[in-house]
Image (cartoon, rainbow, N blue to C red):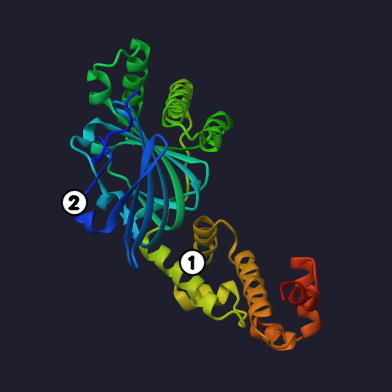
Amino acid sequence: MKEIEKYPLDEIKVKDEYSPYKRYEDIPGGKKVFIDIPNMYNIELTCYNLIPGLSILIDDSEIKDKLSDRDDILEYDNPEDYLIINYIIEGQCRLEVVPDKYMFLKDKDINLYIKGSNTCFFSYLGKTKVFHILINRKQFNESEANYHNEYKIMISELFEQITEENNILFKSPENITKIITELFEFKSKRNISQRMYFQLKTLELLLELFEYEIRDEKMYLRTYTDAQIRVVRTIKNSLSRNIASYISLDTLSVSYGINLTTLKNCFRDMYGKPLYTWYKEYKFYRAQELIKNTDYPISKIANMIGYKSSSKFAQAFKKEMGVLPSSYRKKKK
């Protein structure tokens, strides 16, 4: 078996405009692509071209400025020939389902679409890890490789299903999650072993999707406008800077001009937990940092995160962390 080609990476091609910011690294069976644009993108793509027309890409990124597939860093010669399968491993992504209406995707969500006909835009913000499968129908069917006809039929029918639905989103069933977990856990120092294993597991995953009733498994999520999302992000940032304060949800709703129910739902969907759960956890995270990294008295730290009574703070800290603040400081010295 030939080793993976030198650059470019077959159908995984980085747009020329990102060339000044990219570098490559060889890994067993594939390549890594790093794209680092200060204050915008810190992207690590692990790429494997498995067989002609079938590639996988592991996207491990820290996005400081929203990155959308509307302005994808990759280029596609014939986008209408590409089926994209996205599996969210960790973090959160955003899907524009219609203009200015967004859903939030979380871990174990699957999103499938045809690149050239997709009108819904998939975007990242923050720390995310996404597993992508890229299928080039034309390249797959026209390859000189002796694929079984069943593979070509399977790929053709998957394209037909996704073309009919345009964009499909559903929660991953256990068998697909298991395959992806096994794929990530396999490590080999031999290039051939790594690529062959990925080939087998990816084809197994496609078979499971082929057997799965995709049309019946669409997931309907709440949608939000860009303005609502920006308000909720502003509220979170404001609370992060003012950890000593206590502001009711009603007050936040009125102050920022956002419906109370929308505020609650949007915050949960964006950050994976209720606003006050997040705020409480964040306060104690900051308390940990202050106890560990400063010599401030415990009473002052209590006051800095909104507790007037240091004894009540100590009780609450022990309930959250399992130890008293003073004991936590001694352990970290």
Mark 2 and mark 1 lie on one chain; the one further toward the N terminus is: 2
Marks 2 and 1 sit apart, C-alpha to C-alpha, by 44 Å
Please indicate, yes or no, whether residue 84 appears anywhere in the rendered image: yes
Residue on which disc 2 sits: 16
Looking at numbered disc 1 in the image, what kind of residue is underneath it?
A: Asn
Name the quadrant containing residue 40: bottom left
Residue on which disc 1 sits: 259
Mark 1 neighbour density, 10 Å: few (under 14) some (14–19) many (20 or more) = few
**Who is closer to the viewer here, 22 or 147?**
22
**Who is closer to the viewer here, 291 or 278?**
291
Say which element carries label 1: loop
Quarter of the image where the C terminus is located: bottom right
Percent from the top left, x then y, of residue 47?
36, 40
Quarter of the image where the N terminus is located: top left
Which numbered disc covers residue 84?
none
Residue name at image x 61 percent, y 82 percent? 245
Percent from the top left, x then y, of residue 160?
31, 24
